[in-house]
Amino acid sequence: MIELVERQDKLRLPGVVEITGVSARSQSRNRPVDTDKYRWFDDAATLAEDPDVDVFVELIGGSDGPAKFAVESALKAGKHVITANKALMAKHGMALAALAEEKGVDLLFEAAVAGGIPVVRVLRDSLAGVEIKRVAGILNGTCNYLTTSMLETGRSYDEVLAEAQKLGYAEADPTLDVSGMDAAHKAAILSAIAFSADLDFSKVKVSGVDGIDLLDLKLADRLGLRIKLIAEGLLTEDGVVCRVEPMALSANHPLARVNGSLNTVRIEGDPVGAITLTGPGAGAGPTASAVMGDVAKLFRPAIRPAFGRAEHHVARPFVAAMGDETSAFFLRVRLADQPGALAALTEALAAEGVSVNQLVQDSADDSGASPVAIVTHRCPRSHMQAALTRLGKLTMLIDAPRLIRIETAS
Ligand SMILES: NC(=O)C1=CN([C@@H]2O[C@H](COP(=O)(O)OP(=O)(O)OC[C@H]3O[C@@H](n4cnc5c(N)ncnc54)[C@H](OP(=O)(O)O)[C@@H]3O)[C@@H](O)[C@H]2O)C=CC1
Ligand SMILES: N[C@@H](CCO)C(=O)O
């Protein structure tokens, strides 16, 4: 978050953000950013109440204790609060929201649910005109990383969980992740927004993936199933049902293909139908991105320039899109069915430095045209264009070739 504030000239915030001060448990701890240049507060609540502070950002964690005390102190002092703390919001969110309303300040918590996916904003604002029926998906990056990576790499539960902790995905207490509790906090928060419900976490049914072993994942895989921790909020005639449990999904289920620390949320409602948001669900970068989105929301006035442009933004020009990009290409030609046609085609490509990766040829049709499709190795587009010019001169070429750039998954 501090790192993002420090390079805000590259961002698109409506105004300029200043860090008034910072607080953590230990002042001397080595951190990825230099906090020495900011005012230091031993006590987070004192920072929250400081007269120079307009917005208090809470990234401490824990449903009670110092996080709750500091957030309450900030709200009581009339400061806007941004928090990533789902445990706090799931347990005390209703009371904190009431306090924020009473004080006329904002309480924003985009980072609390699904990491970098802006689902809170979408549900609360963009879909305010939709009657939501169901919100479901993968809401814990650690568990998704665990089940995906164990199966992919054959490593043990303990090994992969330790890695998820090292990568900054897991909670300070990872039992919150693997027990399903963290996903349950998030599902409860989303349900409260989606269904205008009084959040009552005691009603949420929770089970997790704790101790799941490689054998479970491998056997399920042999049966064409992927085990994932699934969270769901559902509107029923009696009220809101909210639950989290491991589920075995058929391998071609859309959720089964959301892997690693990715999260995904499917929102079903009337009259929009279903919307699915997928993105990084855990880690420092996605969390900071969500926090900064909340910071941007706090700038007044509510009426913004239509394209979000502010005077202090760096203005960038549009430039022509088609540079000489390097890519693999799909090339389809139709050749006269005569000896040497295929060789002439590959020679024309080779002469311009385009090498063939895959090639299929169909038998000639009634008119004597034989379709050939080629996937090339990566090459500059200019080489491909030169090869096309060469091809254009071949007498056995029946009509214009079709060239399509191949997009590979990143
Ligand atoms: N990790 C993730 O991917 C995500 C986390 N979150 C949420 O963000 C919050 C923080 O999580 P995470 O960064 O992982 O946790 P960490 O434990 O890594 O960081 C907690 C930070 O809070 C500081 N801290 C602890 N106690 C106090 C205190 N009493 N007063 C002031 N500062 C204190 C710590 O200080 P020190 O450095 O000195 O120990 C540390 O800097 C949690 O609510 C978590 O649920 C939300 C989305 C994603
Ligand atoms: N521990 C959480 C962090 C993001 O909320 C997770 O793994 O999803």
Image (spheres, rainbow, N blue to C red):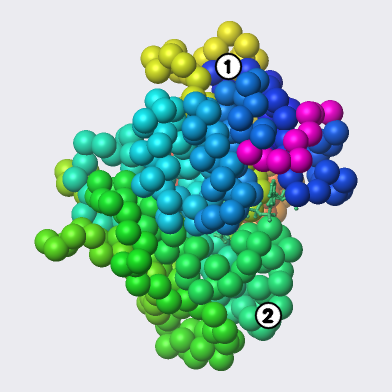
Residue closest to the far top: 311
Q: How far apart, in angstroms, are the residues tagged by discs 1 and 2?
A: 45 Å
Q: Is residue 284 left or right of residue 217?
A: right
Residue 151 image point, x, y percent: 59, 79
Instruction: Look at mark 2 in the image and give the residue it sits on.
Output: 158
Q: Is residue 315 above or below residue 200?
A: above
**Residue 308 placement (x, y as % from top left):** 48, 18
Residue 66 sits inside the magenta stretch: no
Q: Is residue 282 left or right of residue 229?
A: right
Which residue is at 56% across, 91% downward? 215
Return the disc, 1 or 2, that comes first in the chain's sequence.
Answer: 1
Residue visible at 64% across and 81% down in the picture = 157
Answer yes or no: is residue 388 visible: no
Q: Is mark 2 within 8 Å of ligand 2?
A: no
Q: Is residue 215 visible?
A: yes
Category of crowding for the residue at label 2, using alpha-carbon neighbours closer than 10 angstroms: few (below 14), some (14–19), many (at least 20): some
Lateral position of residue 398 relative to residue 154, left or right: left
Q: Is 364 or 257 nearer to us in this picture?
A: 257
- Residue 3, placed above or below residue 143: above
Q: Quadrant of ligand 2?
A: bottom right
Find disc 1 in the rendering and name its residue. 15
Q: Is residue 39 magenta?
A: yes
Mark 1: C-beta under 8 Å from nearest atom of ligand 1: no
- Position in image of residue 357 (x %, y %): 64, 60
Camera-side residue of 293 and 327: 293
Dot 2 falls on a residue whose secondary structure is helix
Q: Which residues are magenta?
A: 37-45
